[in-house]
Amino acid sequence: MADIGKSLELRQLRHFRAVYEARGYVKAAEKLELTQQAVSASISKLEASLGAKLFRRDCKGAVLTDAGQALLKRARIILSDVRAAVEDIDALSSGHEGEAHIGVAGDPSGGVVPRALYEIFQKHPRITVSIAAGFSQDLKRDLLEGKLDGVVAAPDQEWRSDRDLIIEELYTTKLYIVCSAKHPLANRKSVTLENLQNYPWVFPRHPALNHQTVTSIYLEEGLAPPAKFIFCDNINAGQALIVLGEYVIPGYVQLNEMLLEHNILTILPIDVDFGVRSAYLAYRRNAVLNKATLTLFDYLRDAAKIVRDKPGYYDSTPVIDNA
């Protein structure tokens, strides 16, 4: 074990990752602009150093063994950290500010990420940012595997720091019941759960917390939950449904801010607590983050301060969970 570190080379890890991503040596060699023999030799040398086979062949091509799976997670992190270190050095020598790679899975405010990007592009035009979208748990996995530098997410369940990740709470916002300004209930001074029973609802995809929360609230009051509902993950489609029809949706004021300001949508006055949602910034503990990523994180925190000062938010001070 003591000699493995001396024999491992970064190029071998790059070759290993390329074979995995290409599912074979031929395509990996083309991507790396090497011969197939050179790539095969590099992988063979890596396997000899580790004392384990990293790939097996099947009808789909080169498939990772258990040892290969274990190496892939660490290889991605190592290569990601090396990339960040090189970008920092490049920024010092050439003025290039580097790249930041983040994932975004929900931003109930509709504003933290866009505000941060606007500011960073105005003040640091040489910084480039790539954004991956997806479900929070998928992006969290990609973050742990080194594919991303950070994640902004508003997951259904609370995230907490652990030995691998640091979690910062950016803000917490309240859920309201939103509908069209032309909805039959829109002009009432007060609305009850019974009033909403027979109208169709829009929820994020099952088993999203919003649907579970609404169902639980109705059952606790001894009422049957709304029988008419549709699951919709697309924000624009969901907004169109409530604008054009009699749908109601547990939503965030800030995400529908423009439509509310122009009296296209309205908030129903119902004295029921439908819960809150917290948004987090997550990044790997002890990760080597480049200057571009650290700068983006600062702008995300600044944008969150602006969001927390708006109506409908809680916790005027951020929570950084470094446990």
Image (tube, helix red, strand yellow):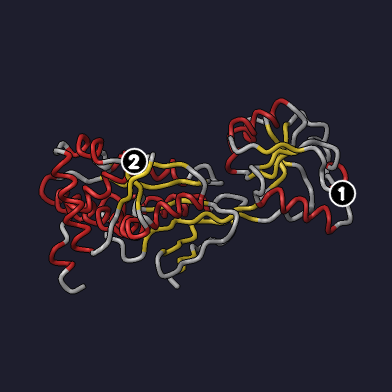
The relative height of residue 302 versus residue 129 in the rendered view (above or below) is below
Residue drawn 33% across the image and 50% down it: 56
Secondary structure beneath label 1:
loop
> Looking at the picture, how far across and down is residue 230, in whole percent?
71, 36
Foreground label between 2 and 1: 2
The relative height of residue 141 versus residue 180 in the rendered view (above or below) is below
- Say left or right for 33 vs 283: left
- Which circle's residue, 2 or 1, is located before the other in the chain? 2
Q: CA distance from mark 2 to mark 1?
A: 53 Å
**Type of residue at label 2?**
Gly
> Looking at the picture, how far across and down is residue 182, in whole percent?
76, 28
Q: Which residue is mark 2?
A: 61
Q: Determine whether label 2 and label 1 are within 8 Å by CB.
A: no
Given the current orientation, which residue lies at the most extreme top position?
244
Q: Callout 1 environment at 10 Å: few (<14), some (14 to 19), or many (20+)?
A: some
Total numbered labels: 2
Given the current orientation, which residue lies at the most extreme front position?
58
> Looking at the picture, how far across and down is residue 300, in whole percent?
41, 51
Residue drawn 70% across the image and 40% down it: 249
- Say left or right for 21 vs 1: right
Q: Which residue is mark 1?
A: 224
Q: Callout 2 environment at 10 Å: few (<14), some (14 to 19), or many (20+)?
A: some
| Residue 77 placement: quadrant | bottom left
